[in-house]
Image (spheres, grey):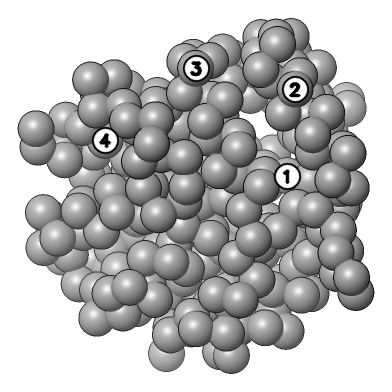
Amino acid sequence: MGVRTKNNVNVSGAPGAPVLLLVHGFGCDQNLWRPIVERLASRFRIVLMDHVGSGAADPAAWDADKYSTLSGYTADVLDIVRELDLRDVIYVGHSVAAMIGALAAISEPDRFAKLVMVTPSPRYIDDDGYRGGFSATDIEELLESIDSNYLGWSHAMAPVIMGNPDRPDLHAELEATFCRTDPACAKVFARATFLSDNRHDLAKVPVPTLVLECAVDAIAPRTVGAYVHNHIPDSRLITLDAIGHCPHVSDPDVTAAAIAAFALST
């Protein structure tokens, strides 16, 4: 099975321009990058993908064991950049995909030029001296809710994740994306996402990194953005004047501008 079919890989934008690989987070798919693509396609070559178990990725490729940890998703990213023979990739990852990008860059640094982390979190659960935003009980209850009623969880959580309470259209868009995800796959990806701890990987990130956080984010609070920035050697932190966990959807102008400025900087 080719990776283009397996991960529903789509390439667009300006031939010969710098490559942006846009990678979605848990419960999402590549369609949520649409506002960013519209703003950046004239200046970049855009590569989009869906994680196996999400979007229009090939369902026959699903392997619960492989995708029970972030290493399985990382392996797919590396397969894509090898198959397309991509070099100097500017990897843009949302939420958990930011950590997937970090792992990919650590594994094959020659393929990647820069890393953009959009609302990242290396660990969602609070720990000694670390504020991830959730207690272990919070995460246990979240996972139980996904297990027992994924569609109900999607309806309840989409407004929390998206923020912007005055924009129900955005909540509906995110909920619809959640609902396109196979619940059985979502349960596995949720555990890989919310139980992961990649704090020790941050110091190994070998490429210049931009950390984009939002002024208000119920999923990745600003303590997390500061932590990521402080632990990646060559990083900069930008706090967007945005609300919610998905600024590429809710505030695409400022998000696209920040990505482009970083990607084109020398």
Q: What's the amino acid at mark 3?
A: Ala
Q: Earlier in the sequence, mark 2 or mark 4?
A: 4
Q: What's the amino acid at mark 4?
A: Asn
Where is residue 106, by image quadrant? bottom left
Considering the numbered disc 3 on the image, is that residue within a helix, a strand or a loop?
helix
Q: Residue furthest front?
A: 65
Report the Cα–Cα distance between label 3 and label 1.
24 Å
156 over 218 or under it: above or below = above
254 over 210 or under it: above or below = above
- Image check: 81 left or right of 260? left
Q: Earlier in the sequence, mark 2 or mark 3?
A: 2
Name the one closer to the observer, 252 or 191.
191
20 over 229 or under it: above or below = above
Residue ID for mark 1: 245
Residue under the image location 52 percent in, 35 percent down = 189
Residue under the image location 90 percent in, 74 percent down = 129
Residue ID for mark 4: 7
Report the Cα–Cα distance between label 2 and label 3.
13 Å
Could you tell me which quadrant the N terminus lies in? top left
Question: Which numbered marker is on residue 151?
Answer: none
Residue ID for mark 2: 144
236 over 102 or under it: above or below = below
Where is residue 198, by image quadrant? bottom right
- Image check: 38 left or right of 78? right
Report the Cα–Cα distance between label 2 and label 4.
28 Å
Question: Foreground mark, 2 or 1?
Answer: 2
Report the Cα–Cα distance between label 3 and label 4.
18 Å
Question: Foreground mark, 2 or 4?
Answer: 2
Name the one closer to the observer, 69 or 249.
69
Report the Cα–Cα distance between label 4 and label 1.
24 Å
